[in-house]
């Protein structure tokens, strides 16, 4: 009964936030000539933020379960930095004249999500090369850290190359800082299947992740193939993060804060926690996009800046509460 109430409250929160997002922003819905276009643009933004928030929050739950550490986020695997680099390279390729040749094979609007997916796949391939049956979590964490550092450095190089063209520079910087303002319907439609399949796949591994919380040796004793669970969950986390970055660029703290906020309410079981995190993550990112749109400034605030400003203090509070609970047993 309690968990049903929690789900109902999260759904109501998401619907209320989405309704607010459709009603606010630049332009007035009172103008009959502009209303259809404004609603279409805002609905696309809402769907993009919803899918990206759900992906990042669910990926955070899974990563924290795999590493048995509530302080890690999806970026620890290096696939986030890889997807970001892939998106930057896709923007660079389009600006440097690859659009005609690409357009014959795939729509230019799909180049960005494909670039993010390829970048995440490259990072994932390197990571899985170290992900053996007996590989410890420390090796994976170190590998992910090294990959993130490498891809971020290359991303900085790409950003410096983009400075030669003003429009390309703005596009790369906007993508790096995060935002759903430039997301089109085709991009949302292309990313949605990856999000839905990734969420369903992660939820299907809930039972194994629950057993893995007791420790790797205990999980092996109970018949769980730890290496297989780790490999497949890492794959699906990469799918979710690449889709989220393609939709909203670099957006931080969603996969870190949302699972922390929900565990005291729904517990640590992944079968309940993953869908609850997806709902709250979606509502959180849609709400952050509303703040980005209505903030009184000449230019729209980047979505990643909003999530960082809101997410960091919330995470510090949740972290302090977690350690107080641990100290008091």
Image: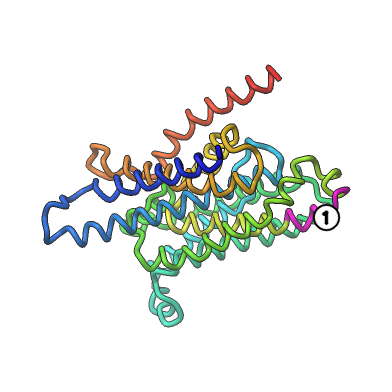
Give the image quarter of residue 241: bottom right
x and y percentages locating residue 191 in the rendered image: 47, 63
- Can the viewer see residue 76? yes
Between 75 and 268, which is closer to the camera in this rendering? 268
For this rendering, which residue is in front, 90 or 116? 116
User: In terms of depth relative to the viewer, which is nearer, 170 or 233?
Assistant: 233
Magenta stretch: residue 41 in it?
no
User: In what element is the residue under mark 1?
Assistant: loop
User: Which residue lies under the disc numbered 1?
Assistant: 133
Quarter in which the C terminus is drawn: top right
Residue at the top extreme? 328
- The answer to whether residue 165 is seen in the rendering is no
Left or right of residue 205, residue 118 in this image: left
- In terms of image quadrants, where is residue 320? top right
Task: Measuring from the top left, give residue 29's x and y in whole percent.
Answer: 16, 52
From which residue to which does the magenta span run?
221-230
Q: Residue at x 65, y 39 (%)?
A: 268
| Residue at position x 28%, y 51% in the image | 22
Query: Image quarter for residue 291?
Result: top left
């Amino acid at each position: 009964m309690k968990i049903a109430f929690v789900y109902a409250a999260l759904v109501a929160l998401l619907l209320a936030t989405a309704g607010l997002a459709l009603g606010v922003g630049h332009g007035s819905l009172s103008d009959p000539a502009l209303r259809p276009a404004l609603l279409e643009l805002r609905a696309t933004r809402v769907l993009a933020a919803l899918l990206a928030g759900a992906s990042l929050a669910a990926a955070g739950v899974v990563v924290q379960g795999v590493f048995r550490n509530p302080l890690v986020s999806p970026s620890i695997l290096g696939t986030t930095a890889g997807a970001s680099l892939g998106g930057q390279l896709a923007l660079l390729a389009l600006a440097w004249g690859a659009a005609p040749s690409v357009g014959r094979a795939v729509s230019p609007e799909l180049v960005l999500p494909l670039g993010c997916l390829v970048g995440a796949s490259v990072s994932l391939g390197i990571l899985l090369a170290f992900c053996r049956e007996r590989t410890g979590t420390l090796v994976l964490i170190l590998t992910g850290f090294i990959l993130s550092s490498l891809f971020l450095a290359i991303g900085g190089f790409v950003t410096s190359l983009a400075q030669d063209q003003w429009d390309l520079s703005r596009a790369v910087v906007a993508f790096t800082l995060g935002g759903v303002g430039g997301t089109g319907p085709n991009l949302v439609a292309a990313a949605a299947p990856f999000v839905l399949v990734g969420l369903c796949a992660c939820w299907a591994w809930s039972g194994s992740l629950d057993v893995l919380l007791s420790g790797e040796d205990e999980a092996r004793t109970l018949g769980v193939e730890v290496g297989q669970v780790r490999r497949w969950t890492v794959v699906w986390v990469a799918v979710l993060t690449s889709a989220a970055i393609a939709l909203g660029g670099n957006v931080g703290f969603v996969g870190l804060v949302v699972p922390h906020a929900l565990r005291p309410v729904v517990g640590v079981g992944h079968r309940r926690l993953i869908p609850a995190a997806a709902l709250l993550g979606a509502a959180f990112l849609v709400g952050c996009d509303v703040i980005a749109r209505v903030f009184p400034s000449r230019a729209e605030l980047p979505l990643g800046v909003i999530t960082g400003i809101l997410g960091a203090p919330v995470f510090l509070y949740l972290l302090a509460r977690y350690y107080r609970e641990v100290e008091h047993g």
